[in-house]
C-alpha cells in the first residue's frame, strides 16, 4: 500500500505515512511510529524519492511490491531528470516482473529523452505487445519515430493512439506536427483544427496551426492564429516571436520589430528573438541596430553560429570586410560544415580581391554540397577575375548543366568566351541568355556575373 500510494503523489504518500506514524503512537508501538516518521522525512517538496528508498531498502517488501516501489522511484527519478537512475530502477522492476508494461514503457520514455532511440523503440514495442490498449505508449513510440525521421511509422502510431482515444489532443497535435514535417500541410491543418475544436483554448494547437499557415505562405491566417494564441497566453514568447517572423516575411518590418521587442522584454535571454530582431533591422538597412542585437545574442550564447554568421553578413553589407571575415571564420570554427558561412566568407574575400582565398572557400563549399549551381558559378566568376579562363569556363559549364536556365552562368560564360576572343561561342551564350530573359540589356551582359 505504501509503495502504491506514491503513484498518486506526495500528498497521498504523506497521508499514509502520517497514518502509520499516528497508529504507532496511539498503540504505543515505537518501532511503527518511528517507521512512519522515517517515511514522512523522505517526502520533500513533492519529491517522494527518499520515501521510496526507505521502502525499498528497509521495508521488507515482497517481490511484487518491490517491483512497484522500484517503478515508482524510477518515475520520480525521471520527473527530476535523473535519467541514469531512472533506467536502473525501471530495469530492476522489469527483472522482478517482466510483465510490467508501465515500467517498460517508462524506461522507453527515459531512453527517448536520452536520445537512445533504438532502445526506446524496443521498450515501447514490448510494452505495446503486453498491453495493446496503452495509447500513451503507442503515441510515445510515434514521437520517437518522428525524432528518427521515420515519419510514416510515426503517423501510423499516432493514428492508432487516436483510434484508441479520439480525444487525445497530444496525439492529434503530434500527428499534425509530423504531417507538417512531411510537408503534408493540408493534413496538418486538419489535425490542428480538430484539436482546437476539442479544446478551443489550446494555445499549442493554435500556434502550431499558425506555423503551418506560415509555411504555406498563408500569412494572414498565420497572423490570426498567433494573435489568438497570444491572447490566450500573453507571455507566450514563441507565439509572439513567430508572429514577428510572419510579419517579417510580409515585409511588415515595424510590426515585426514590435513583436520581437515584446518577446525580448518577457525573456531578455531569448537569443532567437534577439537575433531575429537583428535580422529585421538588417533588412531595414538599420545596420548599427542589427549589429547591436547580433552582438547581444552572441554574448548570451558565444557558440551560436547563426548569430555570428548573420553579424558577419551585416558587416559585409557595411563594407567592414575585416570584421565580416572574422565572424565568418568564427562560425566555421564552431561548425566546419557550415556551407553558408563558408560561401559568405568566400564572397567577402572576392570583394577584397583576395581571390585565392575566395577560391579555397568556394571549393570547400562545393565539396560539402556539389549541387549548388550558384556557388560553382561564383567560383567561375572568381576564376574569370584572375584571368584563369579555362577554369572559369569549366565552372560556368558545370553550373549550367546543373541549372540549364541559369542566365547569370550563361552570361558569365559568354563574357569569358569574349575575353578569350572565342566570339561565336560568346554570341551563342548571349543569345541564349536573351531568350531566357528578353528584357536583359545586352551591353550589361558583356562582363562576368559577380559572385
Image (cartoon, rainbow, N blue to C red):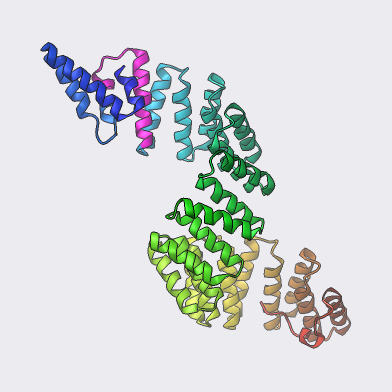
Percent across and percent down for residue 244 are: 53, 63
Question: Residue at the location (52% across, 37% down)?
Answer: 117
Question: Residue at the location (56% across, 60% down)?
Answer: 337
Question: In the rendered view, would you say 324 is above or below 217?
Answer: below
Q: Is residue 123 left or right of residue 392?
A: left
Quadrant position of residue 376: bottom right
Residue 235 showing in the rendered view:
yes
Q: Residue furthest bottom?
A: 443
Q: Is residue 182 magenta?
A: no
Q: Is residue 170 left or right of residue 13?
A: right
Q: Observer-nearest residue: 288 or 225?
A: 225
Question: Residue at the location (26% across, 29% down)?
Answer: 50
Q: Observer-nearest residue: 239 or 377?
A: 239
Q: Is residue 405 left or right of residue 199?
A: right
**Which quadrant would the N terminus be assigned to in this image?**
top left
Percent across and percent down for residue 107 are: 45, 30
Question: Residue at the location (57% across, 67% down)?
Answer: 248
Q: Is residue 56 magenta?
A: yes
Question: In the rendered view, would you say 393 is above or below 304?
Answer: below
Region rendered in magenta = 54-79
Amino acid at each position: 500500500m505504501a509503495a502504491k500510494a506514491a503513484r498518486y503523489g506526495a500528498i497521498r504518500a504523506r497521508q499514509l505515512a502520517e497514518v502509520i506514524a499516528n497508529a504507532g503512537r496511539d498503540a504505543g508501538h515505537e518501532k511503527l511510529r518511528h517507521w512512519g516518521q522515517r517515511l514522512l522525512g523522505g517526502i520533500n517538496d513533492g519529491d517522494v524519492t527518499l520515501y521510496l528508498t526507505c521502502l525499498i531498502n528497509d521495508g521488507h517488501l515482497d517481490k511484487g511490491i518491490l517491483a512497484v516501489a522500484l517503478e515508482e522511484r524510477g518515475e520520480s527519478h525521471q520527473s527530476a531528470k535523473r535519467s541514469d537512475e531512472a533506467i536502473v530502477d525501471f530495469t530492476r522492476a522489469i527483472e522482478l516482473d517482466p510483465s510490467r508494461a508501465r515500467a517498460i514503457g517508462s524506461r522507453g520514455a527515459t531512453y527517448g529523452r536520452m536520445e537512445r532511440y533504438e532502445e526506446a523503440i524496443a521498450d515501447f514495442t514490448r510494452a505495446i505487445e503486453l498491453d495493446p490498449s496503452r495509447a500513451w505508449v503507442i503515441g510515445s513510440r510515434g514521437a520517437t519515430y518522428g525524432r528518427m525521421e521515420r515519419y510514416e511509422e510515426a503517423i501510423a502510431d499516432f493514428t492508432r493512439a487516436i483510434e484508441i482515444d479520439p480525444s487525445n489532443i497530444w496525439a492529434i497535435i503530434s500527428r499534425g506536427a509530423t504531417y507538417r514535417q512531411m510537408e503534408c500541410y493540408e493534413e496538418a491543418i486538419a489535425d490542428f483544427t480538430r484539436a482546437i475544436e476539442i479544446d478551443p483554448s489550446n494555445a499549442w494547437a493554435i500556434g502550431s496551426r499558425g506555423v503551418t499557415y506560415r509555411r504555406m505562405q498563408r500569412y494572414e491566417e498565420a497572423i490570426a492564429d498567433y494573435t489568438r494564441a497570444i491572447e490566450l497566453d500573453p507571455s507566450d514568447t514563441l507565439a509572439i516571436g513567430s508572429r514577428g517572423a510572419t510579419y517579417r516575411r510580409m515585409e511588415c518590418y515595424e510590426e515585426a520589430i514590435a513583436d520581437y521587442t515584446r518577446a525580448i522584454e518577457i525573456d531578455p535571454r531569448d537569443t532567437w528573438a534577439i537575433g531575429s530582431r537583428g535580422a529585421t533591422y538588417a533588412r531595414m538597412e538599420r545596420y548599427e541596430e542589427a549589429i547591436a542585437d547580433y552582438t547581444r545574442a552572441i554574448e548570451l550564447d558565444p557558440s551560436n553560429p547563426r548569430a555570428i554568421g548573420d553579424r558577419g553578413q551585416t558587416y559585409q553589407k557595411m563594407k567592414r570586410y575585416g570584421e565580416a571575415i572574422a565572424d565568418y571564420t568564427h562560425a566555421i570554427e564552431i561548425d566546419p560544415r557550415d556551407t553558408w558561412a563558408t560561401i559568405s566568407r568566400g564572397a567577402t574575400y572576392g570583394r577584397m580581391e583576395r581571390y585565392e582565398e575566395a577560391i579555397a572557400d568556394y571549393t570547400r563549399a562545393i565539396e560539402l554540397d556539389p549541387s549548388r549551381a550558384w556557388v560553382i558559378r561564383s567560383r567561375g566568376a572568381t576564376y574569370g577575375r584572375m584571368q584563369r579562363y579555362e577554369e572559369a569556363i569549366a565552372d560556368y559549364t558545370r553550373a549550367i548543366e546543373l541549372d540549364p536556365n541559369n542566365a547569370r552562368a550563361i552570361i558569365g560564360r559568354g563574357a569569358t568566351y569574349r575575353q578569350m576572343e572565342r566570339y561565336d561561342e560568346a554570341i551563342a551564350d548571349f543569345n541564349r541568355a536573351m531568350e531566357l530573359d528578353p528584357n536583359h540589356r545586352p551591353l550589361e551582359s558583356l562582363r562576368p556575373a559577380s559572385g
